[in-house]
Image: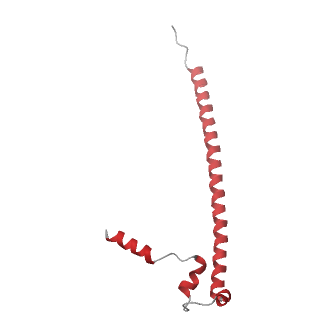
Amino acid sequence: MWSRIKATLLRQFIHDVPHELAACEFGCKLGKCSHDKWERCERRIRSARRLEEYDQSSSVKTRIISEMSQRHDELETELSVEFGLAIAFGAAWLAAWLHRVTPPAHH
């Protein structure tokens, strides 16, 4: 019960900070600054660049993982088909071999 009360209180007072404001919120000693100062802030600009680089590399990684997953699914399908054909061929071969080796039943 205490954990639910604690979680409710935390949600009331603690909010997520947008990524673009994280450098200002956590890495700056100034309480507030003007819009002009904020626009020119080197710390904020560096942070924004790092965030952009991270987003780009993250999207590249996501695309690569997606392509690898798709290729895996394609290979899995190909192997399933090939395996099915191999089993069918093996069963047909075995049936033919058994038919040749097994003497006909006498009635």
Above or below residue 78? Residue 90 is above
96 horizontally vs 1: left or right: right
How far from the left and from the top, in percent, is residue 56? 67, 71
State the residue at coordinates (59%, 34%). Answer: 87
State the residue at coordinates (42%, 75%). Answer: 10
Q: Nearer the viewer, residue 36 or 53?
A: 36
State the residue at coordinates (67%, 80%). Answer: 49
Q: Residue furthest top?
A: 107
25 horizontally vs 43: left or right: left
Q: Nearer the viewer, residue 82 or 35?
A: 35
Q: Residue furthest bottom?
A: 30
Image colouring? secondary structure
* Quarter of the image where one finds residue 1: bottom left
How far from the left and from the top, in percent, is residue 52? 66, 75
* Quarter of the image where one finds residue 7: bottom left
How far from the left and from the top, in percent, is residue 4? 36, 69
